[in-house]
Amino acid sequence: MEAYPLQLETAATLAPLAPSEDARWDFARPNALPADPPPADPPAALSPPARGRARARILRLIREEPGIHNRSIARSLALSRGTTSYHLHLLERRGIVVADPAGRYRRYFAASDPRIHHKAAIHLLRHPTARAIAELVAARPGLIQKDLCQALGLLPSRASWHLRRLEQAQVVAARRTGQRVHYRAGPAWEEAERALPGRPSVPAIASLATGPAAA
């Protein structure tokens, strides 16, 4: 995975807020994160150094896994959802992170990360089926939907739904030849794939890549 320096992770950026600003936090305010309950651990219960360390850890994780959602951040860092929401709100308010509300969760990107331009593609590729389709198409340029469905065991309707969304996000590109539509990797595929952790989600991709592309 390509490393991006933590340009904004400075003492001034991640320093704890003054007690007076912490005290003004209102968890019932309308622009609070809608999917999370009020923090189980009130920020006042954490020392200022602990609050600063928590924000630094959250920002580092977002840079390592762009598009990660708030609940995954809480699980990965062993923080309560409320405490995580508190720090995410502060980072977003300061312009250090950007939230993408698409889908069921709010997904976060570092504001200075160039990969933010592919956030739609990264969001889609976090779905295992969409990622499997994109990986297979990249491995076998010119693949048609019928062969893709056979390789991955998908219903045509399900494959069509994912392919349409992947094409809209420029993860795959389609080319029609007569009655057939051939798929290949799109311009957003390479950068979005590098941004996501983990190995390919389809064990058979290595062997499928050696097969002939659909005519």
Image (cartoon, rainbow, N blue to C red):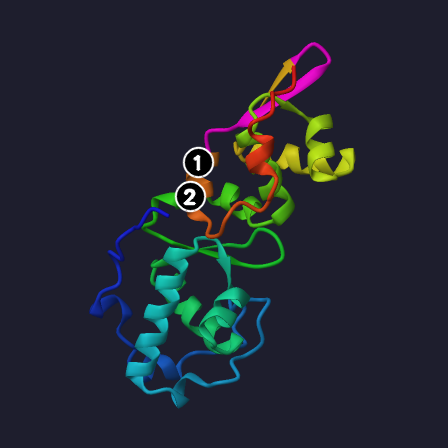
Q: Note whether 184 is above or below 42 in the view shown.
A: above
Quarter of the view holding residue 147: top right
Q: Which mark is residue 190?
A: 1
Secondary structure state at the residue bearing disc 1: helix
Asked whether, in this view, residue 96 is left or right of residue 174, the answer is left
Q: CA distance from mark 2 to mark 1?
A: 6 Å
- Please tell me which residue lies in front, 39 or 128: 128
Q: Note whether 177 is above or below 206 in the view shown.
A: above
Secondary structure state at the residue bearing disc 2: helix
Residue 46 percent coordinates (x, y)? 37, 86
Q: Report the magenta residues as a range.
A: 177-188
Amino acid marked by disc 1: Glu
Residue 149 percent coordinates (x, y)? 72, 33
Q: Note whether 149 is above or below 199 in the view shown.
A: above
- x 58%, y 34%: residue: 207
Quarter of the view holding residue 96: bottom left
Amino acid marked by disc 2: Arg
The answer to the question of whether label 2 and label 1 lie on touching residues, with beta carbons closer than 8 A, is: yes
Give the labeled residue for mark 2. 194
Residue 45 percent coordinates (x, y)? 40, 90
